[in-house]
Image: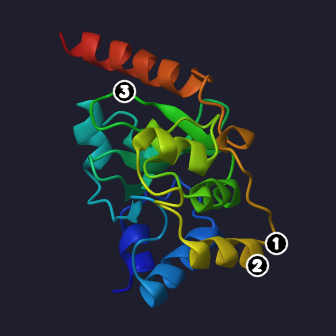
Amino acid sequence: MNTFEKIKSGIPKTVSIPAGLEKLCHWTDTHGYPISGCFELSADDGETITSWMGFDKVSDRFGVFGNGPDGSLYAFWINDNADQKIVHLGSEGEELYILAEDFTDFLRLLAIGYDEIGFSDMDMTLEEWNDILDVEKDYGANPEFREWVISEFEVSIPERGHEIADMNDRSFAEWIENQLEKYTSAAD
């Protein structure tokens, strides 16, 4: 089973799988890692969100497709308006962000090359961020991946992540907090 089939098998039927995910999986199967930064594709066993949340009442609203080195998750999320977005769930329950409105924008964000998207300062360029980390100015960047995203999706790659991700938008974090309050207090 190839990477896409593995990931697809762990995503609930309620979540729409964009064609871009299959293309990314194929690119990764062909070119290997790193894709960009520390991001890796990963298949969900169907229990990841249940484990992360501590209950299974909202698992059908998520489709996990990737992770960071610390166990952070990258997923499709269906909000209360039935809009599907790309989100980051930090491994410790923090860094809860909407990263992109759609998968193509997520790929554009990924192509910037930040080492860990959920923890990087999106107001900075990759070079500025890497200067703070005291690493090589292009650390995390994969020029081959970047060029593939540009040509395959006919898009440009922004200099700064905030052109795509609004890290001050707390709507996803608030939704998570509401679900935790609703379902964990009901269990008490």
Is 104 above or below relative to 148? Answer: above
Amino acid beneath label 1: Glu
Q: Which residue is mark 1?
A: 154
Residue nearest the observer in this picture, 109 or 97: 109
The quadrant holding residue 153 is: bottom right
Residue assigned mark 3: 94
Q: Is residue 167 left or right of residue 10?
A: right
Horizontal and vertical percent position of residue 28 = 46, 80
Image colouring: rainbow
Marks 1 and 3 close (CB-CB < 8 Å): no
Q: Amino acid at mark 2?
A: Ser
The quadrant the N terminus occupies is bottom left
- Do the residues bearing badges 2 and 1 touch, measured as CB atoms within 8 Å? yes
Badge number at residue 88: none
Q: Which residue corresponds to mark 2?
A: 151
Vertical placement of residue 96 versus 174, above or below: below
**For mark 3, does the 10 Å Cα neighbourhood hold few (<14), some (14 to 19), or many (20 or more) residues?**
few
**Numbered disc 3: secondary structure:** loop
| Residue 123 % position (x, y) | 65, 34
Residue 87: % across, % down: 52, 42
Q: CA distance from mark 1 to mark 3?
A: 33 Å
Q: Nearer the viewer, mark 2 or mark 3?
A: 2
Assess disc 2: are there few (<14), some (14-19) or many (≥20) residues with their C-alpha within 10 Å of its C-alpha: few
Residue kind at label 3, given as amino acid type: Glu
Residue 156: percent from the left, percent from the top? 79, 62
Residue at screen point 47% across, 38% down: 132
